[in-house]
Image (tube, grey):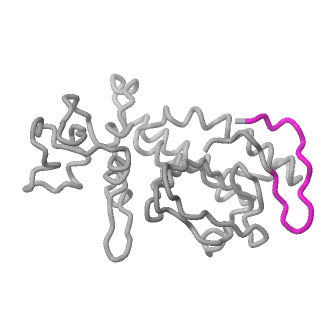
Amino acid sequence: MASTTASPPRAAGDHPRVLLPGAAGYRPSVVSTSLPHLAATGCGHLLLPFVPVRERLRDAVESFFDCLFDVFVEFTGLISWCKGASIGWHSDDNKPYLRQRAFTDVIIYTADNRNVHCVTEMTEGERLTLTLWFTRDRAYNEDPKLLTFLSQTSLSCEPTEQKSYIPMPASDNMYWFSYDQCGFDIRCARVHVLGFSFHSSSDEYSTSVLPAEDDPIELLGKQLRLGRGDDVFEKIFSNSLHALQ
């Protein structure tokens, strides 16, 4: 992440935006996670690298748009765009439930219709984006949600479990993505994109993904193995999120 101490030149006209160079990078072929989701599923340790990034970006927004102490992080998401993914022209406050959004992302711009943008279709590889939306409405501040989830998961753990970094899955419908009158589980989609497949923990040598008599979605929260091609690997993971981690 590039330093944000230097003051970039202000954009001219009615489309204010600032580019911070050096940044890294819910639709078909798109999978994502958010910081509240990481906190809620026992992955609070994975939040640590995001803390300084969020603070530096918030400082840049406040400085460039002259709104000191008036900006809150509304949402932080790590999004994977795979082959075939795209999104048409839009502004980031284009739904009634998104009106609180004021500024977006590492190319920092106003979230309203002065900065309509799109993502053209991915033709190969994987595009990873770290997207932050900022709000000037304290009621949509993301931080209290994170603290609530972190305190809940911390209190629910036994002392011997607090050093464990095994994530706990949320409700199954949290991972379900509806598309064209059907849908898919993003845990299965993610492992497929990476070239692997999920297998029952007792299914060491079989090439079938899961026993036919079991609900495959339910088994994603249980112990399982990873496979690739005709091979099923020996290591047993606590659940699908543990395997993906």
Q: Position of residue 23 (x, y in %)?
A: 68, 41
Measured from the top left, where is residue 164 in percent x and y? Answer: 37, 27
Identify which residue, 225 or 120, lies in the foreground: 120
Q: Nearer the viewer, residue 83 or 63?
A: 83
Number of residue marks: 0
Query: Residue at 88% across / 37% down in the picture?
Result: 6
Q: For the magenta stretch, what is the residue range?
A: 2-18
Query: Which quarter of the rendering shows the N terminus?
Result: top right
User: Is 151 drawn above or below residue 83 in the view shown?
Assistant: above
Is most of the magenta stretch helix, strand or loop?
loop
The image quadrant that residue 13 belongs to is bottom right
Residue 150's x, y, as percent? 49, 39
Residue 232 forms part of the magenta stretch: no
**Quarter of the image where the C terminus is located:** top left
**Image point (34%, 42%), residue name:** 241
Residue 216 x, y percent position in the rendering: 19, 54
Quarter of the view holding residue 157: top left
Q: For the view shown, which residue lies furthest in the front direction?
A: 123
* Relative side of 199 to 23, left or right: left
Residue 14 covered by magenta stretch: yes
- When the figure is inspected, residue 19 is found, relative to residue 87, above or below; the finding is above
Left or right: residue 77 compared with residue 74:
left
Q: Is residue 33 left or right of residue 16?
A: left
